[in-house]
Image (cartoon, grey):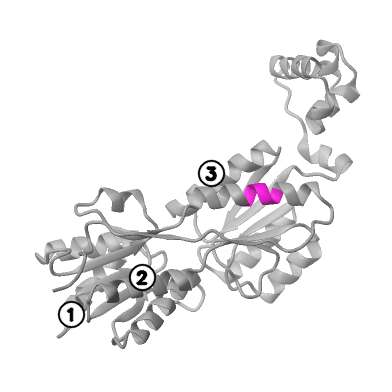
Amino acid sequence: MRDVSLLAGVSRMTVTRVFIRPDHVLPETRERVQRAVLELGYVPDRAAGSLATQRSGFVGLVLPTLSNGNFAAMVEGLTEALRTAGYELLIGYTSYSVAEEERQVHTVLSRRPEALVLAASAHSATMRRQVAQACIPVVEVAELPDDPIGHVIGFSNYAIGRAAGDFLAGLGHKRIAAIGASSDGERRDLRGEARLHGFTDALLAAKLPADMVRMEGDIPFSFTEGARIMARLLDEAAPPDAVFAVSDLAAVGVLMECRRRNIDVPHDMSLLGFGDFEIGQQMVPALSTIAVDFDDLGRRTGELVAELLQHDDPSGIARTDVGFTLIPRGTTRASVP
């Protein structure tokens, strides 16, 4: 700090302001300090600074997985919005385990984040108590929970499943399957389960059988799992004529299994996924899917967090439904003869 202040020709207090409250420093002075920092290779001690300012400068984020492209897009949008407001992310992931979520949240909170973003799921009672005692803004994303911890920005996975079932039934299909991951007791894909529940209700409302709605795959639900479950469905006495997969990745596996068996998609089999992943867009035929703008979801979450941190007592609890879009492509026909 002394060396930076001497090189820049300013006081140590001015150097501190540049790091903590840069908008309170004249642009030309701020530029001199930043040039001195670069020249000297100075790295501020954020831990020590947070003791003095009571600000850590970061926001905690806990996700089920880091391998999902949609969550990656959300992280990008969230990071961009937070950086604009002067915050950085500290990320943990749970591998879809409620117990691991509890541990990850405890670890993040021990580093005193200024806010916490959670991918909404079945949080443990202990985790809820930890978050409540932290007294920081909390935003849950990628779901619309009935009993939220704090603010919510997401979409209804149940409604997505319902829309998928209505769509395939509306095409005239009669033997419709849906596939998703099963619970192993410790890990659960609650969002995928909610999509399957919505899908089942859509079939029942259309007076169609729901016996081919299967929760059998491993978590995370992958290409291999989609192909494996589809193989079993095709070996049944009355195989399906349409399939909904709770993830585009599994849907691609389904498409590959149909290729191996010379089943024409969409002439003999309609296929619908969720996620609008790039691989589905590039398949031949291109995958019909249901899309959510995760980049926008992340950006809006970051903007909300920044707003909450600027106001000590924000009014009301935000609950934002970002919605979804069903995108018919080459794996579904206009109608079934």
- Quarter occupied by the N terminus: top right
Q: Considering only vertical position in the picture, is 84 above or below 121?
A: above
Q: Residue at x 69, y 76 (%)?
A: 125
Q: Residue at x 24, y 72 (%)?
A: 171
Q: Which residue is mark 2?
A: 164
Q: CA distance from mark 1 to mark 2?
A: 19 Å
Residue 113: percent from left, percent from top: 74, 51
Mark 2 / mark 3, whichever is N-terminal:
3
The amino acid on which the numbered mark 1 sits, given as a three-letter code, is Pro
Q: Which residue is mark 3?
A: 76
* Quadrant hosting residue 5: top right
Q: Nearer the viewer, mark 1 or mark 2?
A: 2
In the picture, measured across the screen, residue 108 lies left or right of residue 175, that is right
Q: Which residues are magenta?
A: 301-305
Of the pair 246 and 322, the residue shown nearer to us = 322
In the picture, measured across the screen, residue 110 lies left or right of residue 242, that is right
Q: CA distance from mark 2 to mark 3?
A: 28 Å
Residue 256: percent from left, percent from top: 20, 60
The amino acid on which the numbered mark 2 sits, given as a three-letter code, is Ala
